[in-house]
Amino acid sequence: MPEHCPVCGLRYERELGFYWGAMYMSYGLSVGIVVTVGLLLYHVFNDPPTWVYLTAVATIITVFTPILFRYGRVMMLYFFGSVSFDVKYRKP
């Protein structure tokens, strides 16, 4: 991840250890995915064996880990970093 935004020059690292909280944000998103996948498997496939739950959840979380990590950092910036989106900097 770059240190500064190439468009507006915002410094992403607000303070040392700022993004440790992003781990908790990412964890929360992961829990939401696990619950959603578990409920879908239970209701759509009529409660399959445990190995199906474990395989499905492990595969989906492994695939989405980079995205969850990035969105955890974005959520930290928006909620606790006093950062907001400005339309005038949007690229066409």
Image: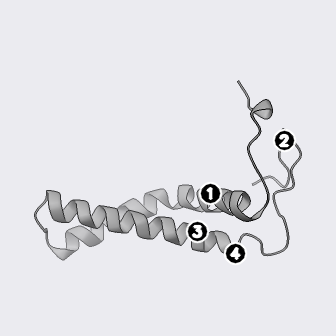
Measure the C-alpha gap from mark 4 to mark 3: 9 Å
Q: Residue furthest left?
A: 46
Which of marks 2 and 3 precedes in the sequence? 2
Task: Provide the residue designation for mark 2.
Answer: 6
Q: Is residue 86 above or below residue 28?
A: above
Q: Amino acid at mark 4?
A: Trp
Measure the C-alpha gap from mark 2 to mark 4: 24 Å
Task: Provide the residue designation for mark 1.
Answer: 70
| Residue 2: mark in rendering | none
Could you tell me if the residues under marks 2 and 4 are in contact, i.e. CB atoms within 8 Å?
no
Task: Provide the residue designation for mark 4.
Answer: 20
**Residue 54, position in %: x, y?**
28, 72
Which of marks 1 and 2 precedes in the sequence? 2
Measure the C-alpha gap from mark 4 to mark 1: 13 Å
Quadrant in the picture for the N terminus: bottom right
Q: Nearer the viewer, mark 3 or mark 2?
A: 3
Question: Going by the image, does 79 lie left or right of 66?
Answer: right
Q: Amino acid at mark 2?
A: Pro
- Badge 4: how crowded within 10 Å, few (<14), some, or many (20+)? few
Question: Going by the image, does 51 lie left or right of 86?
Answer: left
Which of marks 1 and 4 precedes in the sequence? 4
| Secondary element at tag 4 | helix
The residue lying toward the viewer, choosing from 50 and 27, is 27
Residue at the image point whose x is 13% and y is 59% from the top: 45
Task: Provide the residue designation for mark 3.
Answer: 25
Measure the C-alpha gap from mark 2 to mark 1: 17 Å
Could you tell me if the residues under marks 3 and 2 are in contact, i.e. CB atoms within 8 Å?
no
Residue at the image point whose x is 10% and y is 64% from the top: 46
Which of marks 1 and 3 precedes in the sequence? 3
- Badge 1: how crowded within 10 Å, few (<14), some, or many (20+)? some
Q: Amino acid at mark 1?
A: Arg
